[in-house]
Image (cartoon, rainbow, N blue to C red):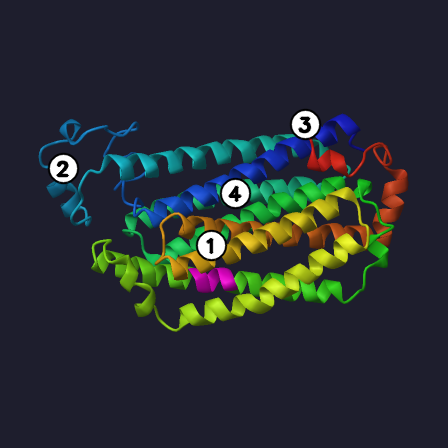
Amino acid sequence: MVNAKAQRRFLICALSTVVIIYMLILVGGIVRATGAGMGCPDWPTCFGQWIPPTSEAQLPADYQTIYADRGYAETTFNLRKTWTEYLNRLLGVFTGFAIFLTLLFSNRYRQSDKPVFYLSLAAFILVGVQGWLGSRVVASNLHPGLITVHMLLAQVIVCLVIMACIRAYRHNIDRTAILGLPSVIYPLMWFAMIAGLAQLLLGTQVREAVDLMAKQSNYVNRHLWIDNLPIIFSIHKYLSIPVVVLNIWFAYRIRASQASALLSSLALLLIGLIVGTALMGMSMERLNLPMFAQPLHLWFASLILGVQFAIYLILRQGRSPADASDRRASPVAGKQDDTQIAQPG
């Protein structure tokens, strides 16, 4: 069995990886909102250099012709966009290293708890796929469909790491309060997660419509964009109402059940993210799609999915009879409190 020190080391690394992935999702949203996606028109280099230029004078005089011949019309060096995209790529590489370390630390589970190792391995493999997909996004000149797949794959990767965390931590889950929750909460949570994912997909379609209008208007006259959005914007807006109500009900039931500190903290975080997402959505409609609100809206929605998924996994693990026997047999059972995963340091 994995000892307490090895478990703690894996959880710290895996949770840090989750944080890094969510930071990458935020930066990716900023790249898209600022139109910096083609700040580096080639991949993996940027304007043919591993460290991008800081001025147009550092590029060949005919660089625009060179990239036009490669299919990238109207390529113009922009310092802000180039370095925004470059920093996004650097964070992507850092994410790959973080998941590799998570995989290394999960190796201790290969004998006693293989799912932890294989979930970490799957996340590591998908990070490689994500890197390749990122290169295809650049090669396609930011094809909207590929951007959406790229974003969804990031959600899959972070969910795999979250699954590995909860699986490794399952011996320490307090089952007392969990068993008192109504069984209807589980199918309703699945419904809420599916609805949240649908909202995320609808949001990407709205985002694509906004991108199109931004290009057509040369990123000016933002006050006219909302009125010209397709009906999918209204669907996305009004579907959010039952999603908000359902998630607040979950959080209330969990906190009212006097569940563990970990579950109560996640429930409170879920409420905060729901409120934050709603505020960002309203600000986009009322303030004519301010640039700061778009990446934050996507980021909060991604975090909501992750928190929902973590809560669901903890509740399922806490109700599992098999895990009750594992808990008694585990050498780390009873030695840690739920607050340790929330405060790994």
**Which is nearer the eye, 268 or 194?**
268
- Are circles 3 and 1 on residues that touch, CB within 8 Å? no
- Please report the residue visible at 80 percent of the width from the left and 65 percent of the height from the top: 183
CA gap, disc 3 and disc 1: 32 Å
Q: Nearer the viewer, mark 2 or mark 3?
A: 3
Of residues 343 and 306, the one drawn nearer to the viewer in this rendering: 343
Residue 44 visible to an observer of this rendering: no
- Asked if residue 18 lies in the magenta stretch, the reply is no
Q: Which residue is mark 4?
A: 22
Rendered image: mark on residue 63: 2
98 in relation to 201, above or below = above
Residue 280's label in the rendered image is 1
The residue that appears at 40% across and 63% down in the rendered structure is: 205
Question: Please, what is the three-letter code of the amino acid marked with disc 3?
Answer: Gly
Numbered disc in front, either 1 or 2:
1
Residue 326 position by quadrant: top right
Q: Report if the CB atoms under discs 3 and 4 are less than 8 Å apart.
A: no
Q: Secondary structure at mark 4?
A: helix
State which mark lies toward you, 4 or 2.
Answer: 4
Which numbered disc, 2 or 3, marks the residue that appears first in the sequence?
A: 2
Q: Residue at x 87, y 50 (%)?
A: 176
Q: Earlier in the sequence, mark 1 or mark 2?
A: 2
- Pointer 1: residues within 10 angstroms few (<14), some, or many (20+)? many
Alpha-carbon span between mark 1 and mark 2: 39 Å
Residue matched to label 3: 345
Q: In the image, which residues are magenta?
A: 199-203
Q: Based on the displayed image, in which of its 4 quarters is residue 143 positioned?
A: bottom left
Q: Nearer the viewer, mark 3 or mark 1?
A: 1
